[in-house]
Image: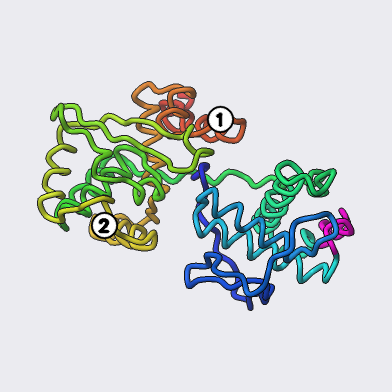
Amino acid sequence: MDIEPQEEESQPKRERPVQAQLFTLSARGELTQPMADIPALHNACSLDVARWWFRRHLEQQKRPINTIDSYMYDLALFQESIGNKTLDRINTTDIANFLGQANNKSTRKRRLTSLQGMYRYLVDKEKVLPKNPADSFFPDYIPLKTPHTLFPQEQDAMLDAAHAENSRTYLITYLLLKLGLTRTELLALKVDHIDISDRANPVVYVYYDEIRWQPKERKLGAGPEFTEAFEQYVADYKPVARMFNLLPQSINKIVDRVAEAAGINKTVTPQSLRDTFAVEQSKAGADEKKLLQILGLAPDSRNRKSVQRYIKLAAPPIAGVV
């Protein structure tokens, strides 16, 4: 589970649709100087004009480039699906057909998110349309993934194997397993987010740049062993701003490598380490409200169901009838 902001799904290989030639993109996909004057938004403008202004809006909000690219990818597919229709001629049938082309529930949900995001911008912010035609659609229910947790001896083996590799591997494993950080939070962590002024009770602050994710911010207490591990890592790697200058795939590979070195045969991922942390916190007495807080989860129904599963897994085993 990573209900927070979730991991990007893998997509089948396909040719990307051709982007509208109203503007040019940098190597990172950011808007550069338009190739021509961009028309103003109005209800009879083309979808490619709306996409340009929507992308500009997302960039001004400093949304992650991967998120922007995902929106633009889906909207380009939508334009390919409906042809040259203007905004005022796009209807619910067009949207239904486009969503129906998705090959699985996750893809349909992502496409709907992209459409609703653009239409909220056009209706609520720019007010060029009177209503949102995507509002009548709802995402398919996607069942929660079963948590895959580590037994206590496996947790110890992971930490021992990580420590034997190097200080960076140990600190990464500790933050995932003992503090329950997501991979995204781990990679956003900065040196000055760590407070070791009280060496016996260090604190890790989890911050978010985007306003909409700031309710997930929290501070997590660690043990004195974290202070020693942090100091050793700083001495060895001398991080300046971000703690770990790594790619998301690198974190996966580190966890894979440590699990193999620890002799653990089952699949271990950053998410399964977070799941393990949640179950251990529940065993220590954390209730539903506390788990939502320490995991940085919004108190919605889906997240409540997730933490309830952790609580069940943490409960004592049911004794058989003798």
SS state under label 1: helix
The residue indicated by pointer 2 is 258
Q: In this rendering, which labeled residue sits more in front, label 2 or label 1?
A: 1
Residue 237 magenta-drawn? no
Q: Residue at x 28, y 35 (%)?
A: 204
Structural crowding at the residue carrying mark 1, measured as other residues with C-alpha within 10 Å and reported as few (<14), some (14–19) or many (≥20): some
Q: Is residue 273 left or right of residue 199?
A: right
Please state which of residues 212 and 220 is positioned toward the viewer in this rendering: 212
SS state under label 2: helix
Q: Residue at x 32, y 45 (%)?
A: 189
User: Magenta segment range?
Assistant: 86-97
* Image vertical order of residue 96 relative to residue 312, above or below: below
Please state which of residues 115 and 202 is positioned toward the viewer in this rendering: 115
The residue indicated by pointer 1 is 304
Residue 88 magenta-drawn? yes
| Residue type of the residue flagged with mark 1 | Arg
* Image vertical order of residue 108 relative to residue 174, above or below: below
- Quadrant for the C terminus in the image: top left
State the predominant SS element of the stretch in magenta: helix
Q: Is residue 315 left or right of residue 159?
A: right
Label 2 – label 1 distance at C-alpha: 31 Å
Q: Position of residue 71 (x, y in %)?
A: 63, 58
Q: Position of residue 268 (x, y in %)?
A: 37, 53
